[in-house]
Image: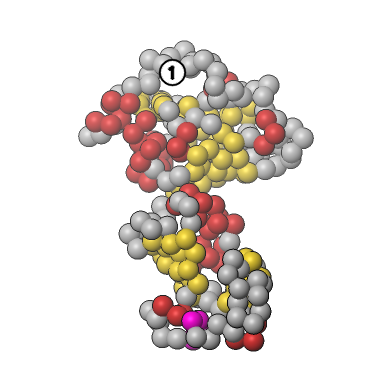
Amino acid sequence: EVFSWITKREVPDCGFITLKIRTSSIHEAVFDKRSNVLKIRGFVEVPMDKLDRWYDPFSSPGSPKGYLCLKFQNYAEFTEVVKAVPRLKARVTFQNGTLPVVKQWCKEIKVGTWQSGEATVHFEEDVFSWTTKREVPGLGHITLKMKTSSITSAIFDKRSNVLKVRGVVDVPMDMLDDYYDPFSYPGSPTGYLSLTFTNINNFLEVIRAVPRLKAKTSFESGALGGSSAASRAGGSGALGGS
């Protein structure tokens, strides 16, 4: 419902204070993927209008005085924010394209040998995430995720429509250690995230939106046509015995 921060510089006649913007006031936002800057058109609550010289939320669109500007460390950090703030996600646009989010129903998900159950998986350029159908021991139903930067190899079986990804699923407090070890030897069933898709077309939609996955994926019954990256990815030898 709100963004808030303590100012590093003193607000005139107010000192170091907490400023905030209510998400209900956001009516547009633009994120620049090159500079990692988010510009929000909304209403920052400034005590006694002490920043009138610099800030005017009612200024004409495009005026630099009319925005709250936030510079993030990287794009991945910003995607964490928009997932948590629906109002911002609904209002944000991107200067070099929209945020690619592909939602696909997977009828079976396994983290190592632990069966997570069926779920809708959100595939984004930087992260995969889903809410577990089964309770994680000691944690209940939680959202698990895998950052695509951790993916080292993947293989898709065209016959079973199963994708097996070698990467790191972030499991809180290592509660699945008995079932999942992302650093186990190649070929061990405990070392993979396995996702069963409804059909290959649904999977192809995912890899079009996730370049890292596309580059690391090979196919058990043939490489993806027209993709030299997929054929170079190999991984089928290392993933043998699955």
- At label 1, the amino acid type is Leu
The residue under the point 47% across, 33% down is: 150
Name the residue at 55% across, 57% down. Answer: 81
Q: Which residues are magenta?
A: 54-58
- Total labels drawn: 1
Residue name at image x 60 percent, y 77 percent: 11
70 above or below 134? below
Q: Residues within 10 Å of mark 1 (few under 14, many from 20)?
A: many
Q: Position of residue 197 (x, y in %)?
A: 47, 36
Image position, residue 157 (x, y; %): 41, 25
Up-down: is 114 above or below 148? above
Residue 169 sits in which quadrant?
top right
Position of residue 135 in the picture relative to residue 33 (left or right): right
Task: Examine the image and state in which quarter residue 213 appears.
Answer: top left
Q: Is residue 34 shown in magenta?
A: no
Q: Position of residue 22 (x, y in %)?
A: 62, 73
Q: Is residue 173 left or right of residue 197?
A: right
